[in-house]
Image (cartoon, rainbow, N blue to C red):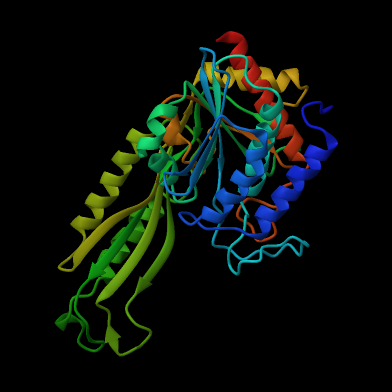
């Protein structure tokens, strides 16, 4: 694809920005320095409004035409992952045990590139909102932004986001109407009983039987079925029981289970099924169930997805070979419940290391492609509205 959206110097500046963000990753809910870096980078583009501390550490950068028209939002994520990096890059993470292994550094660079373009090309009408969103990895960030009173005046008519996707051909694009990413939630099961001597287990209250019933239920839903309306997947993520000793029958146990479905109503039914099963097999031990990392399903509006598809074709980019919806979750789903959205996927290469792997790194070559896709998508929206 021939790039005429950014200059060579702008691409160099965005690549340098991406590398600096990569070196200084911050976890969900603690992204203040990352947001500050982006704010300082974009202030020279003279945005008409800049809102900091949005939904936590979020940042909104607004370019307003001053003329009536649509509000169009583009989003990138601020947060990194609690995973050590093993890439050997000269710009590797300088924060022990934390790294941008999902490509959010690249997504931020792309959105900042849209800001560079808007600095010299204000929208003809309406306004454009660049949202650098906190806490995507926990599922809390988008809802926090939506619930922030500062966001009330920013309610967009359209919202777009991209995610890089290893396994797809480099620079190809996958988008479609309907489900784009799954709903999911983590359930934490905490069992509390009473210890006993291992020779007299009947004198205590062990969670072993209750935990076995929970594991049997999870096992029945752990083989991923084909994607469809009835898709249900349960994944055991953590398990612990008792103390490491042979003379003590256990009193305590804990399990982390992640559930996912293609829609929000299906997820709630799935949660109720598992919770009821766990409670029914508690067998004299107390059980606490708590919810964590809740992600809404992302559902693409047909017209919004059409704008991205038209942008892809106008730029001569290949259609990505990727089955929608993505099985993983994306908290952009909270925005898809509030406005017309499209989440699309940008190929990072068929043989690129997978997301969340220790050797993953965002491909810099995607930065100008992503910026051009955002710019062309914006132009498609403004052409129609």
Could you say which is closer to the camera, residue 63 or residue 363?
Answer: 63
User: Given the current orientation, which residue lies at the most extreme top position?
Assistant: 384
Asked whether residue 297 appears in the rendered view, the answer is no
Residue at position x 26%, y 57% in the image: 289
Side of 49 where 217 appears, left or right: left
Q: How many marks?
A: 0
Residue at position x 15%, y 68% in the image: 284
Side of 45 where 296 appears, left or right: left
Split into 4 quadrants, where in the image is the N terminus?
Answer: top right
Side of 11 where 227 appears, left or right: left
Up-down relation of residue 79 to residue 189 (above or below): above
Up-down relation of residue 89 to residue 76 (above or below): below
Q: Position of residue 55 (x, y in %)?
A: 41, 44
Residue at position x 49%, y 50% in the image: 137
Split into 4 quadrants, where in the image is the C terminus?
Answer: top right
Q: Position of residue 6 (x, y in %)?
A: 78, 31
Q: Position of residue 378 (x, y in %)?
A: 62, 21
Could you say which is closer to the camera, residue 169 or residue 74?
Answer: 74
Asked whether residue 173 appears in the rendered view, the answer is yes
Q: Position of residue 38 (x, y in %)?
A: 61, 46
């Amino acid at each position: 694809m021939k790039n005429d959206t950014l200059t060579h110097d702008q691409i160099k500046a965005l690549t340098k920005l991406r590398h600096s963000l990569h070196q200084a990753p911050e976890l969900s809910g603690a992204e203040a320095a990352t947001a500050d870096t982006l704010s300082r980078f974009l202030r020279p583009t003279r945005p008409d409004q800049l809102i900091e501390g949005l939904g936590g550490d979020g940042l909104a950068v607004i370019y307003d035409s001053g003329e009536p028209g649509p509000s169009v939002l583009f989003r990138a994520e601020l947060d990194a992952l609690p995973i050590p990096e093993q890439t050997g890059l000269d710009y590797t993470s300088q924060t022990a045990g934390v790294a941008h292994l999902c490509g959010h550094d690249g997504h931020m660079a792309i959105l900042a590139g849209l800001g560079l373009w808007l600095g010299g090309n204000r929208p003809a009408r309406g306004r454009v909102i660049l949202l650098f969103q906190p806490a995507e990895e926990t599922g809390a960030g988008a809802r926090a932004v939506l619930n922030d009173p500062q966001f009330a005046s920013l309610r967009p008519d359209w919202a777009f986001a991209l995610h890089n996707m290893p396994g797809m051909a480099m620079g190809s694009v996958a988008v479609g109407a309907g489900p784009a990413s799954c709903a999911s939630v983590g359930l934490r099961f905490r069992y509390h009983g009473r210890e006993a001597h291992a020779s007299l287990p009947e004198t205590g209250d062990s969670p072993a039987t209750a935990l076995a019933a929970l594991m049997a239920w999870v096992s029945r839903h752990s083989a991923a079925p084909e994607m469809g309306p009835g898709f249900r997947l349960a994944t055991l993520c953590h398990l612990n029981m008792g103390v490491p000793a042979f003379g003590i029958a256990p009193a305590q146990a804990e399990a982390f289970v992640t559930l996912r479905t293609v829609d929000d109503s299906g997820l709630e039914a799935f949660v109720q099924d598992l919770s009821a099963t766990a409670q029914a097999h508690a067998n004299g031990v107390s059980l606490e169930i708590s919810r964590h990392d809740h992600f809404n399903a992302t559902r693409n509006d047909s017209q919004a997805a059409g704008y991205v598809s038209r942008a892809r074709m106008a730029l001569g980019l290949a259609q990505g070979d990727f089955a929608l919806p993505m099985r993983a979750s994306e908290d952009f789903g909270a925005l898809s419940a509030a406005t017309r959205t499209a989440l699309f996927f940008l190929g990072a290469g068929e043989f690129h290391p997978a997301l969340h792997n220790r050797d993953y790194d965002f491909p810099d070559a995607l930065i100008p492609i992503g910026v051009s896709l955002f710019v062309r998508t914006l132009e498609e929206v403004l052409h129609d509205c």
